[in-house]
Amino acid sequence: MSRRVDKLVVHCSATPEGRDVSAKDIDRWHRGQGFRKIGYHYVIRLDGTIEKGRDEAEVGAHVQGHNANSIGICLIGGVSADDPKIAKDTYTPEQWTSLETLLRDLLTRYPHAEILGHRDFPGVAKACPCFDVKSWWASRQQASKPVCPTCNRLLD
Ligand SMILES: [Zn+2]
């Protein structure tokens, strides 16, 4: 690994609920904004497909002041279909599964990385990614612990 990664940052595309958007679309938008290419490393589409953006070894362009040591993941969605100004948790069951799978995979390569949302950085005046990443991740950790099949109690 050519750079130190200690943060895995979850974003949303801030596109309306139900609209299918691809990494290629975001690449085009970001280039239109003057970026070299898509700013994220991964994009998770509505059907759960994980698409690659920048290479992990490459510094991204997704969170001001923290790009050098982070990886950016973008969930498609994040705003209401009726009003794009309204932040909304719009994610499909397939997106949640893929997000968890991707984060676990990234943790095998960056075991000490912190998992957080864009809005968790100080000074960020956005709702992105429109849910509480830290508490969600904590609940997933809990859910993945081994449970006794008869009494359902946690085994550790
Ligand atoms: Zn963001």
Image (cartoon, helix red, strand yellow):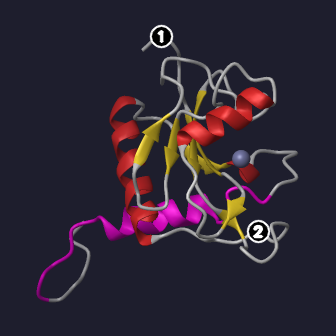
> Is residue 66 part of the magenta span, yes or no?
no
Above or below residue 105? Residue 135 is below
Whichever of callouts 2 and 1 sits on the residue coming sooner in the sequence is 1
Residue 91's quadrant in the figure? bottom right
Which of the two residues, 149 or 34, is positioned nearer the viewer here? 34
Secondary structure beneath dot 2 equals loop
Q: Which residue is mark 2?
A: 87
Where is residue 127 shown, x and y percent of the image?
78, 60
Q: Residue at x 42, y 31 (%)?
A: 110
Mark 1 crowd level (few <14, some 14–19, many ≥20, 10 Å Cα) = few
Mark 2 crowd level (few <14, some 14–19, many ≥20, 10 Å Cα) = many
Q: Is mark 1 within 8 Å of ligand 1?
A: no
Which of the two residues, 38 or 99, is positioned nearer the viewer here? 38
Q: Amino acid at mark 1?
A: Ser
Q: Point out the image quarter for the N terminus.
A: top left
Q: CA distance from mark 2 to mark 1?
A: 36 Å
The circle drawn on residue 2 is 1
Q: Is residue 65 left or right of residue 131?
A: right
Residue numbers of the magenta segment:
127-150
Above or below residue 17? Residue 67 is above
Q: Residue at x 17, y 89 (%)?
A: 151
Q: Most extreme residue toward the bottom, as rendered?
A: 151
Q: Amino acid at mark 2?
A: Ala
Q: Point out the image quarter for the C terminus.
A: bottom left
Where is residue 103 shown, x and y percent of the image?
42, 46
Q: Nearer the viewer, mark 2 or mark 1?
A: 2
